[in-house]
Image: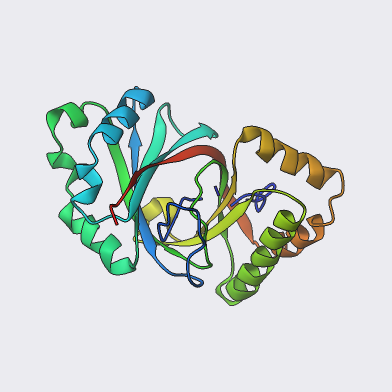
Amino acid sequence: MQKIIISLMVFLMTPLIAQADHHATPGPGEGSFTTFMVQAPDVSAYIKYLKNNPELFSGFNAAAAGVCVTITGQDYHGEMFVWSAYSDVTGAMAETTAYDPDKAPRELAKLRTPKYRVAWKPLKSFVLSPGFERVTRVKIKPENVPAYIAAATKLEAAIRNAGHDFNMGIFQPLGGGVHETGTFLLRGISPNSTEAGRLIDEYFAGAEWGQHYLKASSLIDEVVRDTYESCQQIYTAEQ
């Protein structure tokens, strides 16, 4: 992230209101972002190109941007996405029409195959600190969403109070097509894979915060997909 420890145990994102110094957003649900899912035969080469061409993000007034590479549970080799963070949904929606991936420069186009694009709205405050993230897509009854957000927020706090550097995000897709419609994206973020593993070990060893996990997960009706992603921020707008 980033979801559910087995589904809640780590929620992604991937950031929302982009604050490069890792401050939380001013309030629940502020900001928005877009993701551009691709298949990259050479992930490292693609990321290097993006880092060397910041105008790809500054040209659309993104506050921050980065990449996430799917590490486990991939649907295909080279599965990853590029994310861009905005201070509001207006900025994210403007990008969806301003950027045409089919008109990318030739040297960029050969580095990836476009899959699909989505805009997102966070449903709780979110700290921008990309890392090793467990990402789950889940179904929750509309009437249970407020209770879930409250329970997940308590879970996040309990995990932090137990000494973990952990951030959780809950996101609603906007225009998700067959890939995202009807689900919520949960992203649980640890600094690295070792810390993510330690968190899960503690849960199965009977950590006190596990009760908060059970409360939150009881409000989930179905886990649709469960993956781990390695994420990083590669662009921050000049202030």
Q: Is residue 78 visible?
A: yes
At which x and y percent is residue 134?
59, 44
Is residue 224 toward the left or the right of residue 6 in the image? left
Extreme residue toward the right, this view: 206
At which x and y percent is residue 92?
29, 61
At 66% from the left and 40% from the top, the residue drawn is 196
Colour mode of the rendering: rainbow
At 75% from the left and 57% from the top, the residue drawn is 161
Is residue 97 toward the left or the right of residue 81 in the image? left
At 54% from the left and 58% from the top, the residue drawn is 169
At which x and y percent is residue 182?
47, 62
Measured along the vertical axis of the image, is residue 54 above or below residue 106?
Answer: below
Q: Is residue 119 visible?
A: no
Is residue 47 toward the left or the right of residue 27 in the image? left
* Rendered-image quadrant of the C terminus: bottom left
Measured along the vertical axis of the image, is residue 64 above or below residue 86?
Answer: above
